[in-house]
Amino acid sequence: MTASAGGIFEAEAEKAVDAVLAGPMPEAVTRALIERQVVERVVSELVDSGDLDRMLASAAEDKRTAQLVQRVLANPSVEQMLIDAVDSKLAVELTDRLVRSPEFQRVITDAVRAALARQSATLADTFAASARRIDSRLEAPPRRWIGRSPRPVGEATARPVVPYAGLASRAAAFTVDALAVHLVFLVCCAMVGLVVTLTGHHLSGSVGEALAAAGWLVLVVAYFTAFWTGVGQTPGMSLLRLRLVDASGDSPGFGRSLLRLVGALVAVSIFFVGFLPVLVDDRRRALQDFLARTVVIYDTAP
């Protein structure tokens, strides 16, 4: 009789618990706990006192914990409660607040920026390494033709070995810089043309060509001298991991950079013949490097 009454009581208690879980109470309790920050305060106190670590360690070692978790997860009411909690308006509001919060957006932005930086660095390093291998292959035949020994990796001095940049690396960097300069030049020409058209003026052919030539020359001078003087490398050189230095190992000054640019234009104007000394010179100098007393080295800085 007693056993029967106990079974009936347990059945009724289970029905009552299921009815409570199926109602609005779980969501209301969850909302109250969040609004009053009860969980944060309790967890903070447990962490500060060290009780949380002891409780977790004790619970993890107890076999009854695993059995209890299995029983809870197997309960259809608990499963339904979790589904209702996920689909509830409160969960949607919390998710929306989390996504819109500045802290969450900052974390995502930093993670994406770091991933892109790592990917860009990996691609640039691969590209630079391929160009350096081509440097050695291009220079082997000319040095053999003039009876010179294979090019050393660098100078054997008391200072660390300084590898000088070869023709393939420099040509790739120059191509990138030329594309960048001409892209900026075309954009500027389009903007100027639009402004002239809107104002109702028209430039004659000779005047327009003269202005375009002058603008191109100014842009080229500003681009290369600014980057060489400021950081010792253009964007193309940075992509190929190259750096321009003077005899003291520093970035060249404005006068030296301007002289080097004039030499580079001369080297290009004579069908790139001014770059051929790079193939046989021990420090891989071109015409502009002889004029400005500069060298281009592989940039090994992180």
Image (spheres, rainbow, N blue to C red):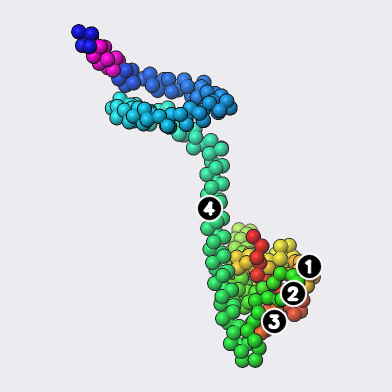
Query: Label 3 near label 1: C-beta < 8 Å?
Result: no
Q: Which residue is mark 1?
A: 253
Closer to the camera in the image, 65 or 141: 65
Q: Which mark is residue 157?
A: 2
Query: Label 2 near label 4: C-beta < 8 Å?
Result: no
Specify start and end residues of the magenta stretch as a single range: 5-16
SS state under label 2: loop
Res 298 quadrant in image: bottom right
Which badge, 3 or 2, comes first in the chain's sequence?
A: 2
Query: Label 4 near label 3: C-beta < 8 Å?
Result: no
Q: Residue furthest top?
A: 1
Left or right for 68, reference 226: left
Type of secondary structure dominating the magenta stretch:
helix
Q: Which residue is mark 3?
A: 282
Q: Residues within 10 Å of mark 1 (few under 14, many from 20)?
A: some
Q: What quarter of the picture does the N terminus occupy?
A: top left
Disc 3 residue type (three-letter) = Asp
Q: Position of residue 125 (x, y in %)?
A: 57, 65
